[in-house]
Image (spheres, coloured by chain):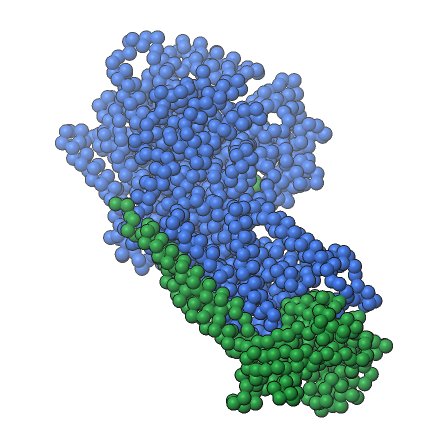
Chain colours: A green, B blue
Amino acid sequence: MMASSYNAKEEDGHITVSGPGTLKSKKPDNTAFKQQRLPAWQPILTAGTVLPAFFVIGLLFIPIGIGLYVTSNNIKEFEIDYTGTDPSSPCYNCSVNFSWNSSRPCSCSLPFTLEQPFESNVFVYYGLSNFYQNHRRYVKSRDDSQLNGNVDSLKSPSKECEPYAHSDNKPIAPCGAIANSMFNDTLELFFMDPNGTRIQIPLTKRGIAWWTDKHVKFRNPGGDSANLTSVFQGTSKPVNWHRPVSELDSDPENNGFVNEDFIVWMRTAALPTFRKLYRIVQKKSHLVPTLPSGNYTLEVVYNYPVRSFDGRKRMILSTISWMGGKNPFLGLAYITVGAVCFFLGVVLLVIHHKYGSRNNSADIPN
Amino acid sequence: MDLSDTPGGPHCLDQYLDQALPGTRTWTRHCPGPGPGPGTARTNIEVVPADLLLLASSDPQGVCLLETANLDGETTLKQRRAVAGLGRPATEFDPENFNCLVVCERPNDNLNHFKCYVERPDKVRVGVGIESLLLRGCTVRNTDQVLGFVVYAGRESKSMLNINRPRYKRSKLERALNRDVLCCVALLFSMCLVGAVGHFMWRRSLPGTPPYLVPDPQGSLDAPSLSAFYMFFTMIILLQILIPISLYVSIELVKMAQVFFITNDVDLYDAEWDRRVQCRALNITEDLGQIQYVFSDKTGTLTENKMVFSRCSVMGTEYPHKENAVRLAVVDEPDPDQEVVFDQRPRRRRPPGWTLAGGEEEEEEESGSGAGQRPHAAPPRSKAARSAHGDVAFSSPLEKEVVPDKALLQQIVKIDFSGGGREVDPYLDFFLALAICNTVVVSTATAQRERLSQLSSGSVSTGPSYALSSLAQKVGSLRRSLASWKPLTRGASPDSQVLAPEEEEEEEVDEEEERGRASGRSGDMDALRSCRLVVDSDEVLFEAESPDEAALVYAAKAYGFTLLARGPASVAVRLPHGERLELEVLDTLSFDAHRKRMSVLVRHPVTGEMVLYTKGADYTLMELLGSPCAEQLNDDQRSVAANCQKHLDQYAKEGLRTLCFTRKTVSEREYSEWSTLRQTALAAMDNRGAQVRDSAVHLERDLSLLGATGIVDRLQDSVPDTIEALREAGIQVWVLTGDKPETAVNIAYACRLLDEGDMVINMSSKDKRQCASMLDCTLEAVRRYPPGPDGAVTDPTVAMVIDGRTLAMALESDLQERFVELARRCRSVLCCRVTPVQKSAVVKVIRDKLKVMTLAVGDGANDVNMIQAADVGIGISGQEGMQAVMASDFAICRFKHLRKLVLVHGHWCHSRLAHMIVYFFYKNVAYVNLLFWYQFYCGFSGTTVIDIWLVIFFNLFYTSVPPIMFGIMDRDVSAETLMGLPELYRLGQGEYKSSIFWVAILDAFYQSLVCFFIPYLTYRGSDVDVFTFGTPLNTVSLFTVLLHLSIEIKAWTAVHWGVMMGSVGVFFVSILAYNALCVTCNPPANPYWTLQAQMGDPVFYLVCLLTTVVALLPRYTFHVLRNTLRPSPLLLARNLERLAPAARRRWTQGWRGGTRGAAAEGTPREERTAPGEEGPSPTWTPPRPPRDTTTNAT
């Protein structure tokens, strides 16, 4: 009886009538896909088949590596640490005495010498060490829609900005920890002419941020032509700032949220030791090097305390190639990997000649 | 349907049955008040709904025929008798007046035993055994009405007690997978711990409060320890991708696709039934690739369960029936075209017993639908239709039609007339014995048809009738489509092939006629012809308790000895010349397992002498041949016995079932003495069975041998090949059968389960002590041989034959260990006379003790337990109901399909899934570790260096489809190679090991280190921001992960290419779009224009190229070196596929020889030495002949 009851069910499932009176066979389609016979490329990795790959990689990587290494070596870079941890440093006093709340700026000047002239555009960076701009809570402490010019967000910043969202019951603009901890040292370069005059080197402050950041991501509330002072009326400056956001720069194109120093700072660095573009020394003519060799002075208005995290502050001068700043690693890595692949290729060639015939059709037992 | 589920229990049987069986079933029930008996039920339905004590049946003798296929897999008819002493036919039986007391034993699961007595009102107790019990699930045959007393119903019925609860199956791979997921959890926790401790130390090292530490809204910072505590949980959230949740979803998807491919395999499709393989369990496809033990049912699984008369030996002369053998070979492929073509020809006289498939149905149809109609206007049922529901027992033409041996035919002709007809002639006796010494019931074709139509209209059996009509439709459409094709086929091979023997036959007969006339004996031939015509004129169908009985009766019919009717006290036979012979049956000594023979005592109507015809197993009958006056046996008789024995040995060697026939003339005095003895035995209350048996033995002696027959229980197609392939694949094959040892051993040899060279251990003992000592000494002996790699003794191959009783003892807890140990060393094991529960017990013991993967295959309800107990249960959807299929994980149509299912699909499914799972683990670890390494550079603050959305997308979109495709479509070795080299199966079993898992994890760590630190060293000290730094990390990971997969992919189809390219494409397109459109969305993150900026930077490409190469170099090199220096057999097999077919074949042979030799699996079969002669213990049997597999416990 179990059989009979099952039978009915079984047959129900079985008979599939495709049309009136005709019965469709349940025979599966004999197609290559359903029978799993699709034409396929079946590579077998053996010494013989992969030999070319190893040699190709070897022969490709070594020249690339050499090229990269040479390019990196041609980049001129100069770095000076002005933290002032050492008592002999001119900035020692500033670093010891200074805190976020100091109202009076502290200045110090560091002399340095460039052994070689910097020919093309020179990029001036400030570098910070041990500054964890990538800390999870820090990275989040910003309001992108406020920075994008959203008026509502200006009045009521996102809660991500807490505890840097309100000050004196007024919304902070720009809110958040990133903005609050913005780098605010002022760096100036002077060329000490052998004849004793101090020539200030003109530093361009435009073009240091990503174009898309400046033009798309960051916008002042009320559009480009608005009066920034009135726009930011009713907001408070970040607690660590000395000036409100509307007074960052005299150039209206570079003021408020679209201030490029601010934009650069807001792009949080990936690693705790980082540099950020500060200024550019534009090349003036083909004849004169941008920065000739000689003595220079770095004038620092020391506003940014780093003692709380054992930080270091540096000023970096660097020329730039197609592959960015100076970094010999990539070139060396390419050369090494290329060499290793080439060596492996040779080893496999030997192996192939010794054992390779095992897999060929030649070893059909006869 | 489950009676116990009805609220009222068995007492409300009638209500329940009315609901469940509407329509033609009529039930009456009588509850004789509260009492032990649940009630009586009268039925004329086929399927018995509860265990019934048979009280009466429509048969005047109270006999009811029963088919127990649903329970024990035997399609043969069993006789059940109404309880003696109540003797009234069912029509007169009034349940209202039934007031006997029925006392029976507690419900148990033994299908072959039942103890009960019925106390009549006059206080006379009648003992009742299993012979009066109709078991639930059986089918009543040939009986119009039976009336029974429900003794057990619902859960208490014997068949239900034999069914175990289904086991929840989880594949071995998934169990291993879960273990490795736990490893991943441990890894996750340790990484989180590192994060928390790291954060604590970082915070402690800070001299002050730096501006980048964001205080909480109240303006205060958490203490370092508290912050570290929180960080632990932040890390869990950050790194939780390490736990491959997506893996589980992917596995389900892959398994679904694997099931799709399995069910769509055209090689696993059976045209005769129009059925595909069914995957009923969706979650254990890969277990098919892990099988180490196969447990198979015999009847219906290995064999077709169709007995066909093959040859015979009469009076010491062998009649090989060559034409019959030819026919058996031809009928192998039944083809509907044949009948169609045949129909077109003018009708001609057919020789007896030689009709084409479907012939008699056509005649029926013709007579029914009018003479003028074309025969195929009313389409006959095809063979498939008939066997599809198995209602017409033994209707296969194969079984019914025997081509007579010419020499034997002439012998018969000779006796009938030259001998005067009435004289006692051994040939006449032989065929009479063939025809009457059995329990075959005769029914006419019309009766059959009536029953069939009745069944079709029944509501419960809508299934069969539906199938019938649809099949009829199908045949009709087939015919239509064939109409145009016919002219072609007429000359084509199926036509000529089928007709050839017939024409030949005609010619032979003609020749004989010629010769007959020439020798002046034309009368004989006329008589012969007339007898044929007579035979041809009416159709008789035989239904027998065992299929071999039917085969013998059909054989007798082929020679003109047609059994016409069997009554309670007489049997009618038509003799070749057309005369009807009525023999009075004095007694029938029915078959029992101890005597292994049955006898019929008849009184010859003409001579009046009483003759005892005995039929039975050769070795029992041969012992009874002698007589007190054995010396008087003439040389003739002695040589007959010797010759016959010779022939029997030969038959056995060919795997035929053999039976001997004897006769004995019983004198009146002897009979009267014996019949009193018999009467007392029959009347006995205690120990009745033994007494009845003894009385039979008393009469069955001093027999004179007539001859012997050989019957083929045809194996299914390709069964020997399949079993051999499974064994070559390193699978140990067990056959568990309810059949008797002799038959089972025969079949085992025929299907190459046992080989000529095998050392066969016979385990048969009567008590436990003996069993233990046998186990001990056999084990001792077997241990002397070196075990093979998987524990089985390989040289020589050891096989074991064990009977059910011994098995029961061996499975008891104290002997279990030894039995399992012995079984482990056997290549194949044959268990005979086992019950369904024992079957599952064996499977469970082997599965649990040896920790191996088991597969059980069976087709009947008796295999359900075994199928459920095994790791993989396979049901063969065939003649015998659906229980096995319902309980199974996979349902196939033929045993031979097992080969491809296991060797190819099993291997593929497992290999694919194993590789995919390892890959998933690798992928997740490799990716998550990028986030983890970054923690060392962000103060363990839990920053994600990659936009969190991209992290989610990475697993969800960019790298999910390729591995799933890999899991579905990868093909390490082609199906042909896997089928051709079954050895590869075992090699494929180790694809997922914890060592492989850990290697993958280590590789993942290495790759993630490379993927993190090469970009790190490149961008160190620069002005790169968080997400700009994360972009190359993400991109590099994508390339590494995908290229890693492409090292693993063995066969690249267009789909693979598409998916790979698609993944990369989707990655770049979607991220570019996201980074371009998302200016302020997803607030704290800052992904705007990052990828665009990076893609404008040549360093990005240089970093990606370098990192990918360095990350994959070790794995790539490792693969290359391994494939070159120590190629795995699977790789060699892949190489093989590149060769031309001819070269491949040579290579395959050479290789197989090599690996076999290496695995010490043996020298070619012929050279194997038989260990039997110097066998270390008395239990050794000489390897052959199988006849000698007698119990030899001492």
The structure residue drawn at horizontal position 28% and vertical position 16%, both measured from the top left corner, is B637
Residue B33 pos. (x, y %): 72, 30
**What is the tally of numbered marks visible in this picture?**
0
Q: Nearer the viewer, residue B771 or B1017?
A: B1017
Say which quarter of the image contains residue B1174.
Answer: top left
Position in image of residue B507 (x %, y %): 20, 40
Q: Where residue B608 sits: x, y (%)?
A: 35, 16
Is A279 on the left or on the right of B743, as rendered? right
Q: Visible in this render: residue A280?
A: yes
Which corner quadrant holds the N terminus of chain B? top right
Furthest residue toward front: A195
Which of the 4 quarters of the picture holds residue B2? top right
Which sits in the foreground, A226 or B1023?
B1023
- The residue closer to the viewer here, B218 or B284, is B218
Q: Nearer the viewer, residue B581 or B233?
A: B233
Residue A227 lies left or right of residue B85; in this view the side is right
Picture quadrant where residue B250 is located:
bottom right
Q: Residue at x 77, y 57 (%)?
A: B226
Q: Is residue B550 visible?
A: no
Residue found 55% across the figure and 40% down from its top: B868
Residue lying furthest right in this view? A168
**Residue drawn at the location 46% of the way across and 14% of the way down:** B695
Query: With respect to residue A97, does B763 lie above or below?
Result: above
Q: Is residue B377 above or below residue A109?
A: above
Please, is residue A16 above or below residue A251 in the view? above
